[in-house]
Every structure is written in structure tokens, then in C-alpha cells.
Image: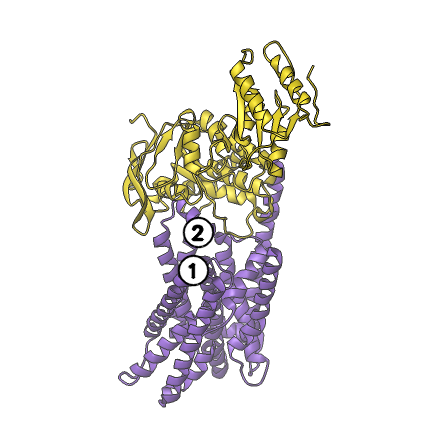
Chain colours: A yellow, B purple
Amino acid sequence: MNEYYFRTEDLSVGYHGNTLIRDIEIRVKAGDILTLIGPNGSGKSTILKSITKHLAAIRGDSFIADASVKGMSYKELSRKLAVVLTERIKGELLTCWDVVATGRYPYTNTLGLLSQEDRDKVWAALEKVHAAELANRDFTAISDGQRQRILLARAICQEPEIIVLDEPTSFLDIRHKLELLSILRTMAKEKGITVIMSLHEIDFAQKIADKIMCVSGETIRHFGTPDEIFRPEIINDLYGIADGAYNITFGSVEMPRPKGEPKTFVISGCGSGVGTFRRLQKEGVPFYAGILYENDVDCQVARSLAAEVVTERPFVPISDTAYDRAMELMKMCETVICTGVPLGETNRRMAELIQEARSLGLLRDGEGGTDGK
Amino acid sequence: MNQLSMSHSGVRRVRYGVVFAGLIAALVLLVVWNINTGSVHISVGNIARIIFLRQGELSEVNIVWKLRLPRIIAAAVLGGGLALSGFLMQTFFGNPIAGPFVLGISSGSKLFVAITMIVALQYIPFISSWMMVVAAFVGALIAMGFVLLAARSIRQMSMLLVAGIMISYICSAITEFLINFAKDSDIVNLHNWSQGSFSGTKWSDVYVFTAIILVCLVAVFLMSKPINAYQMGEAYAQSMGVNVKRFRVLLILMSSLIAGCVTAFAGPISFVGIAVPHLIKMLLKTAKPILVIPASFLGGAVFCLFCDYIARMAFENELSISTVTALLGAPVVIAMLIRRHGSKA
């Protein structure tokens, strides 16, 4: 048996014989979560559909535990692989229980009658997604979050070895996103079920996935662990966004920095500046920020929003280089905003900086121009 | 939690039981009622003797055995078939308004049966029931082919129905045209038939359509599992292990065969195929094929027996069956449309 539970060999996918993406080489171990990320229309769904055999592969093949998906009948495949799709379930007059019960389809007799064992498994699946109380509700009358959980229960009920989900968290609020993803995570790790899904929320992808595949363009340029993939150059290139807009460490997003010649300098520290940076961005005011230690939260945000950030290495006294640069920039400004800096041994010179601003008459009143403690 | 579910599924079961018992009771009642009424009055006792002992006055025996019984069986079996065929087409198109009549399938059958009769009668003196069925089936398939072609380029469901209605008009127009030019006395009946009617059913026909429709009923019932999966949408059905391509072909063949068979013997009959499955789903409060298939068949039988009773008895001249089914079925369809639209808005 191959080390990898699921793999694709030389897979090319597309529609009507036109190749969209070629040379796809996926390698996933049992119980791992693979997440496909990439911009809209990049072909994430196309890849997923080809894996699930909803779309014929143009070239190459996928293998589940070394068994060729191409060579498998739909029936065989249905016992190994379950799906949660973006398209709405049609059906009418279905209760949630009924929807989940359709997951038992590959195991029921000719007429599709459920045995007691099947019923128990439907209940167990509902419990697993914390949706037992929805059992008798009309499937069309529940919320998006509930619907996704029911569809996941349906997939679980199918007792697959691998689950493929196409953007399962779209339209869900943050609580339901978290809930759904943690259910997936638990399932993958406890039951060893392999999960392949596409996600729009790359911050979640970073946190939940064992493997990430970046989909954009004709070939797969990046496939690896979140640590390997979540680098500014890869992510910025993947989505075509400006440097600094997406904060890799926190998975947070900042609006584009204001353009123009800055006339404002913000003195802050230890998170006190974040609100002010964002307010200035909203007002379209370009600004400088400093002097910030590289490990300061303010520094993370300022790097995305400020025209220039004067930084210092962590835990060392503020150097002349940093201080001089800050003074230089400050003198080019018309306003200095101080949002408050806790002062300590190493950043003692911040007090000097504030003093300079005050004596230059630049320090704006009412901006919390405190010297800290 | 499981306690609660038990009681819920208990309620469901009682509902199913009541609906089926009600349908069977209505069927029996309508059969008796239909045998018992007509332009010639025959007492119930006499009828019982005629049917079970085959004793009685020759004229009465003839009325019961040659006129009323075959007609009742035709209304019941073909009515059930219509509902069944409607249900299959609704499943196929994922549209509650689809049915053999609105999609023009019945009219396609009608045209082909008319052509067959007119052409064949020039060479042979007699047309067998089987020939009619084959012609109707071919006509149904060709009309269905056109509908499918339209469906490929028209994604919008309402436009698909308009296409179906247009196909229906074209076929009907050609049929009328042909009938007008056919002077042969054998074809006089053709006009009546082309309006839809259960009258004039012969026992030789009864054997043929009963055999075909019942075999189809069993076959469709055995398809309830994939139909159930298909109701969820094609992609999900496939992920459950259904070979969707093969299944779609099977659906088309079955629904066309049933619709063609009904049309061959009773002409085109409107609205049964849409109204009955809808009413049945409302009564059962489920769309599960394993229940809806037999219940729709029973419901179609009951509906057509009732409509045929009105067609025969309401006025001195017999009405065409479609007149009655449209009058009773169309409001049901309109009500369904309003309800669906209302709930979506």
C-alpha cells in the first residue's frame, strides 16, 4: 500500500475536453485534511468534481487507497467517498432526518428500505454534528448553518473513507464556520477520515489543514503544509493582492493603505495604535508610524497601513538609526498623534520623541498625548 | 430524542395507512358506482349475478360485460398509468408542472397513432392493439426527443413547458388535418378518440394495456430507490452510486412507454399526470417514491373513474374525458403554482 491514502497521478481537469488545469499531483495521508485555496474561478470546484467523478478527468486518474477512481463503478465509489456540494438539494417535503438518511443509500436493499441499524446510524450522524433536535424539521425551513451541518451528517452517514466538500463554510456566520470546521477536524483525526475541501477563508485553511494546495493558473504551483504555503510572496501572488494587505501570522486582512504624501505621524505602542491606523485609513489620510518594536501588534498593522514604519528589533534599546529616522519623518509632518505608549527600560527614548513633537508644536491635543506610565 | 422521533414516525405511518385505505375504499366505491349507473338501469343484485355468475338477461349481460366493465378497467388502469407517467416526468425534469400532456408527449403519440391507422388501414383491414401501442410509443419518444432538444438549449423550466405546449399544438394540428382528409369509415372513431375517451374499450385492448401498465408499475416501483436519490439532484444521486446517465434513459423510456400506451387506448387526457401526483404528495406529506408511486397509481385510477362518471352522466351527450379532467385538474395545478410561488417569495 502506498504511503498516501489519496493521490492523483498526472491529473488534468477541465470541461468539454478543454484542459483548465494540468499536472495535478495530490498526495494526502489517511486522516489528513487537504484544503484547496485560490481566487474565484480558478478551478477549485473543477478539481473537486473530477476527484468525485462528477466530471470526467481529461487525463490521468485519482487513486483511493491505490484503487483507481476511473476504474471504479459509481456504486463502489459511493461506499468510499461522500460529498457536500454547493448546489442546493432539490427534493421536496423532506425532513432533515430524511436528508441524512439518504446517506445510507449505498447500503440499503433494492427498495431502499432502512434497517434498524441504518436508523441508528442516521441518529449517530445527527448527534455527531449536534443536530439531533433538527431531525423532524423541514429541510427547506432551516438556516444555512444548520443546512450545512445536516449535509455533513448526510456525508458522515454514508460511512466514507474520504469526504469531499466544496466551500462548506460559504454563507455561514463565524460561529457556524468554527463549529463546522471543528467537527471536520475531530472527524478526520478520530476516525481517520480523509477530508478534501475548498475554502474561501484562507485564515481557516491555515489553521485547519494539514496540506494546502494553491489553485490558480494552468498548473498547481504550490502544494505543501500550511507553514510552507503561508508566506507573503505565495499568498499575495495567489490572490493578486498588494503586499501587507493580508497578515499571514494572524490571518487578518487590512484595507489598502492610503496613497499620497504623509503629513501625519503616529506614535503608538503595544496595540494602542491599531484603532487610529484604521481610522486614518478610512479617512484616506496617509501616515507614518513609529517607533515600533517588530514584535508589537501595532507594528503588524502599521506595516499594512502606514506609508513607512520606523521599527526596532525587539528587546533592545532604541537605536540612533531608528530615532533619527523617526525625527526626520516627524519633521516632514504637520500633525503628530500619540495614542499612548507604555514606557520601560528599553524604549525610554519614546518619551524624548513625544517631547520633541510637543516642542515642535505638532502634537495634536486630545489625542491621548500621554507619556505613558 | 429517539422517543420523540418514534412518535413522529408513528404519526407518519398512521397517515400513510389512512391515505392508502382511503384510496382503496374510494376505488372500490367508484367501481361499484360506475357499474351501477348508466343510461340503462340495472339493479345491484342483477349486476352481481351478471358479474359473478354470468347469469341474466342477454342485453344486460352485454351492457355490463361489453360496455361498462372494460370501460371501468380502462379508466382505472390508464388513469393510474397517466399519474405514474406524470410523476416520472416530474422527477426527470425536476419540475412539478411536467407531465405527458403539457410536454406534448400525448400529442406526439396521438399523431403517430393517427398516421398508423390511416396508412395501415389502406393495406390491411384491421389494426391490432399492439400496433397502436408501438406507434404511440414511437410518437411519445419522438415528442420527448424534441422536448429534450429544447431542454438542452433552454435552461429555463417555464420556457421548456412553452416548448412542450407548442409541440403539442403542432402535433394536434397535423392530426386534425389528417383526420379531415381520411374519409374511411373506420376512422370516424378517430375523431372521438383524438379528444380523449374511455368509451368503446374492447376486451382485447384491456388485456394488452393492463399487461403493459401493470408491468410498468412494478418496474417503476422497483426503481423507487434510484428515483429517491435522483430527487435530490443529479450530482447527489451520482455520489450515492446511481449511474445517472443510464437511469435518465430508463426514466425517459418508462414514462414515454406508459404515456404512449395510455394515449393509444384513450387518446390524450389532460392534467391527470400533474394534478394527481401533486395531490398525493400533499396527502402523504412526503415525496418518497416508494409511497408516492403506488399511491399515485391508485389516485390516478380514482380520479379518472370519477371524471369518467361525470363525463358519462353529467349531460345527455357524453363529454370528452379531457373536458372533465381539465375542469377538475387545472384548478389543482393553479393552486399548486400559487402555493409554491407564495412560499418562495
Any part of residue A137 in sight: yes
| Residue B212 figure quarter | bottom left
Where is mark 2, residue-wise? B230
Give above or below for A212 relative to A59: above
Q: Residues within 10 Å of mark 2 (few under 14, many from 20)?
A: many
| Residue B206 figure quarter | bottom left
| Residue A290 figure quarter | top right
Q: Residue at x 36, y 88 (%)?
A: B182
Q: Do tags 2 and 1 sit on the same chain? A: yes
Q: Nearer the viewer, mark 2 or mark 1?
A: 2
Q: Residue at x 61, y 56 (%)?
A: B343
Q: Position of residue B259 (x, y in %)?
A: 42, 67
The residue type indicated by label 2 comes to Tyr
Q: Is residue A263 left or right of residue A40?
A: right
Q: Position of residue A9 (x, y in %)?
A: 28, 35
Give above or below for A181 relative to B344: above
Quadrant where the image shows the C terminus of chain A: top right
Name the foreground residue: B66 vs B156: B156
Q: Residue at x 42, y 39 (%)?
A: A82
Name the foreground residue: B189 vs B47: B189
CA separation in Å, label 2 and label 1: 18 Å
Where is mark 1, residue-wise? B217
Give above or below for A11 relative to B188: above
Q: Secondary structure at mark 2?
A: helix
Chain of the residue displaying label 2? B
Name the foreground residue: B322 vs B98: B98
Q: Secondary structure at mark 1?
A: helix
